[in-house]
Amino acid sequence: MIRKALFVALAALLVFGAVGCAKKEEPAATTETAAPATPAKEEPKAGEMVLIPAGEFILGSNDDKLTSAYPEHKVNLPAFWIDKYEVTNAEFLKFSIDKSYSGEGAKEGKDWRQFVSAATYNNPVVFITWNDAKAYCEGQGKRLPTEEEWEKAARGASGFRYPWGEKWEPGRSNVYETGSRNPGPIGEYEDVSPYGVRDMLGNVQEWTGSWYKAYKGSVKGDPNFGERYRVVRGASSRLYGSRFGLWIRSAYVPNALYDFGCRCAKDATPEEAAKAAAK
């Protein structure tokens, strides 16, 4: 992880706005909050990845035929790597300086730099466009995960509703019920998938590399299907986690600027795939 002192020194090279997250929609007020989450025992490492083994997993859901996630079906993926944590402000800042990359939002005066400070250096980067996320991952020698890869890494081979299983457990993820209403440091919650990938349900929603297209067998005639919108996955600190399912799909134009972040993926080599299969 990039040291805080180094981050502050780098941050002095940029002009930052106010810390926080702009909101797309304010949920109804509530006085109920979940029990405090148990802090993670490990210290996150920048760029750390998890190897996901090859094989079948359950994609989508049969809960409602009118959703874009219908129908539930099995997909077989080759082995791949995915970031254990969401990309942080510190990581994206370092990338922007190393590559002289300002980001698409800089043209509009509203982008990720407005939400960065020494206090949020280990929070997920937000207000990056799909193109910003793609540029970052490619700058690390990686790529954005497909939505199929994202869902397998989040749900496991059995297709859990939440990263930890089928039952909602308050306080395990940075979602609306927890009460923060803002992104927090990566890995702070016990929001851990069967493969050990962190913050797949809460904290921030994440860009994937996939176009928003219908699943085979879908009965929903959505005019938005096609190659206009990119898929965003996961919930966030502003969405109700208890009402969420990891199969839920959202989609936005690639230059959308909301509180979305990302994590990266890459293909596994044959040797790495064999190692994963042997476990």
Image (tube, helix red, strand yellow):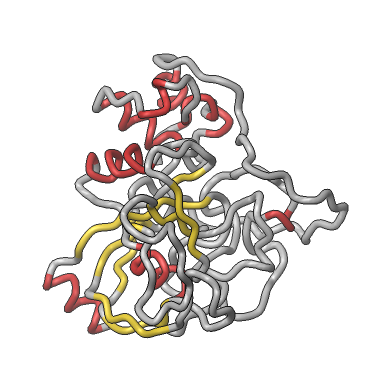
Q: Is residue 24 left or right of residue 30?
A: left
Given residues 79 and 208, the one toward you in this image is 208
Given residues 1 and 233, the one toward you in this image is 233
Residue at 27 percent of width and 39 percent of height: 135
| 237 lies above or below 66 | above
Residue 157 visible in the shown view: no
Q: Is residue 9 left or right of residue 137?
A: right
Percent position (x, y) of residue 277? 24, 82
Q: Is residue 118 left or right of residue 7?
A: right
Q: Is residue 16 left or right of residue 30?
A: left
Percent position (x, y) of residue 175? 65, 56
Q: Quadrant of the N terminus?
A: top left
Residue 221 visible in the shown view: yes
Residue at 35 percent of width and 50 percent of height: 228
Percent position (x, y) of residue 266? 23, 58
| 53 lies above or below 80 | below
Percent position (x, y) of residue 19? 60, 28
Residue at 46 percent of width and 78 percent of height: 219
Q: Quadrant of the C terminus?
A: bottom left
Given residues 177 and 229, the one toward you in this image is 229
Snapshot quadrant of residue 170? bottom right
Residue at 43 percent of width and 53 percent of height: 85
